[in-house]
Image (spheres, grey):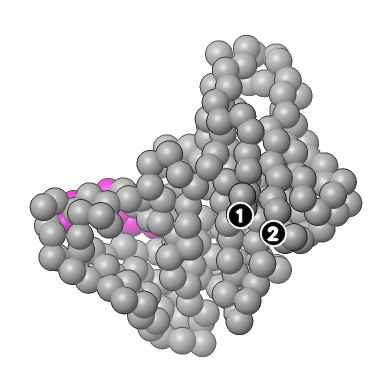
């Protein structure tokens, strides 16, 4: 069982470059999320999706875009990379069972913008 | 207010001791309060969770205490072990599942 798979694991970008962080899940979850994690700041929600074709902004969406064309895939796009986007990015998917929300995270993408 | 405030930022406990991490929230619409455990280089993993109709939930050595009137909840780790050394995040959710995370607590359990 692959779970939530993120690629790449590491990436260095120059200011102004663009890139797409890939995320795919094989658990058939409708809910998917993108978080960024900065030291001492916890995880901040960037964007989320409740199903294919439906996305919405989270707490810190500026500078990012997402799409959800299939249940499995939820890529995150950085159009004009800035040093403030240096962070660790986590993709996650979730389902609810017996009142417990099970959120499964990928292993993360460490991004540096120089 | 959508914030979840977590303390302390770091915690050192001796093996066998009790680790206590606290969180506070303001939004009374939150209806689900999980705790996540994260090891270095890994994504967070669900540890234990509680809903506001329950004041305490215990799973093994991990207990959540919930005080609805004070809008606070805490994680207690009994008989702390070196293998519990990790970063712990509290969180709260609303509106169908968007989780708002606390700032994290780095726990170190000394042998």
Q: Residue at x 18, y 69 (%)?
A: B79
Q: Tell me: B3 left or right of A62.
A: left
Q: Residue at x 47, y 57 (%)?
A: B45
Q: Where's residue B46, x and y in %?
A: 48, 62
Which quadrant of the figure has residue A6?
Answer: top right
Q: Is residue A58 visible?
A: no
Secondary structure mostly taken by the magenta-highlighted segment of the chain: strand
The N terminus of chain A, quarter of image: bottom right
Task: Tell me if residue B74 is in the magenta stretch.
Answer: no
Q: Residue under mark 1: which chain is it in?
A: A
Residue in the image at 54% along x and 39% along y = A108
Q: In this view of the protein, which residue sits in the foreground, B69 or A34?
A: A34
Residue denoted by label 2:
A27
User: How many C-alpha atoms fall within 10 Å of the one at disc 1: few (<14), some, or many (≥20)?
Assistant: few
Q: Secondary structure at mark 1?
A: loop
Label placed on residue B2: none
| Residue placed under numbered mark 1 in the picture | A1
* Residue drawn where x is 52% and y is 79% of the image: B51
Q: CA distance from mark 1 to mark 2?
A: 9 Å
Mark positioned earlier in the residue sequence (1 or 2) = 1
Above or below: residue B81 compared with residue B31? above
Range of the magenta residues?
B4-13
């Amino acid at each position: 069982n692959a779970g939530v798979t993120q690629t790449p694991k590491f990436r260095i970008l120059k200011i102004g470059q663009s890139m797409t962080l890939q995320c795919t899940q094989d658990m058939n979850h409708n809910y998917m999320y993108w978080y960024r994690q900065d030291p001492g700041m916890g995880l901040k929600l960037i964007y989320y999706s409740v199903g294919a074709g439906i996305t919405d902004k989270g707490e810190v969406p500026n500078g990012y875009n997402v799409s959800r064309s299939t249940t499995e895939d939820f890529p995150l796009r950085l159009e004009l990379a800035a040093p403030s986007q240096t962070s660790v990015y986590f993709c996650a998917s979730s389902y609810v069972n017996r009142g417990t929300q099970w959120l499964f995270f990928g292993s993360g993408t460490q991004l540096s913008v120089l | 207010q959508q914030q979840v405030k977590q303390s302390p930022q770091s915690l050192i406990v001796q093996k066998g001791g009790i680790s206590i991490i606290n969180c506070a929230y303001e939004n009374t619409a939150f209806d689900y309060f999980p705790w996540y455990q994260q090891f270095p280089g890994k994504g967070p993993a669900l540890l234990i969770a509680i809903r506001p109709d329950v004041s305490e939930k215990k799973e093994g050595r991990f207990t959540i205490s919930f005080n609805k009137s004070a809008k606070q909840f805490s994680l207690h780790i009994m008989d702390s072990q070196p293998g519990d050394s990790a970063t712990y995040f509290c969180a709260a959710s609303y509106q169908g599942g968007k989780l708002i995370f606390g700032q994290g607590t780095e726990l170190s359990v000394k042998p």
